[in-house]
Each structure stands twice: as C-alpha cells, then as structure tokens.
Image (cartoon, helix red, strand yellow):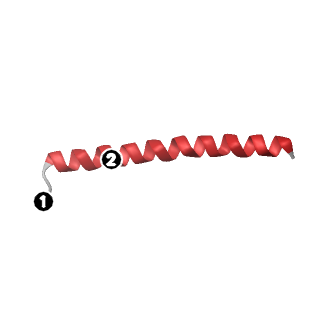
Amino acid sequence: MPSPATKARLGAWVALGAAALAGTGVAWVNFLLGVGEQL
C-alpha cells in the first residue's frame, strides 16, 4: 500500500496537470475565437 506521502505527491502532480490542461484549454479557445473573427 502506498504511503500517504506518495499519495500526496501523486495528487499534487494530478492537480498540476489538470491546471495546465485547463489553462491551455482557455488559451486554445481564445486563439480559435481570434482566428474566427479574422475569417
């Protein structure tokens, strides 16, 4: 069974990854909106 420290480290990486995906998703939507306005 993994120790609590290992679970906490994994949870921190998962949260960091989720935040990065959310940030890139917002940037991607803004980019697409900008491209759509130019068409």
Which residue bears the numbered disc 2? 13
Which residue bears the numbered disc 1? 1
Pointer 1: residues within 10 angstroms few (<14), some, or many (20+)?
few
At 16% from the left and 45% from the top, the residue drawn is 5
Residue at the outermost right position:
39
Q: Position of residue 6 (x, y in %)?
A: 18, 50
Count the labels in the image.
2
For the N terminus, give its image quadrant: bottom left
Q: Residue 35 lies in what quarter of the image?
A: top right
At 24% from the left and 46% from the top, the residue drawn is 9
Of mark 1 and mark 2, the one earlier in the sequence is 1
Q: Tag 1's secondary structure?
A: loop
Task: Mark 1 and mark 2 in contact? Answer it, CB < 8 Å.
Answer: no
Pointer 2: residues within 10 angstroms few (<14), some, or many (20+)?
few
Relative horizontal placement of residue 20, taking residue 5 as reference (left or right): right
Name which residue type carries label 2.
Trp
Q: Position of residue 39 (x, y in %)?
A: 87, 47
Which is in the foreground here, disc 1 or disc 2? 2
- Depth check, front residue: 34 or 5: 34
Q: Position of residue 14 (x, y in %)?
A: 35, 49
Relative horizontal placement of residue 8, taking residue 39 as reference (left or right): left
How many angstroms separate mark 1 from mark 2 (CA)?
A: 19 Å
Q: Which mark is residue 28?
A: none
Q: Position of residue 16 (x, y in %)?
A: 38, 43
At 85% from the left and 42% from the top, the residue drawn is 38
Name which residue type carries label 1.
Met
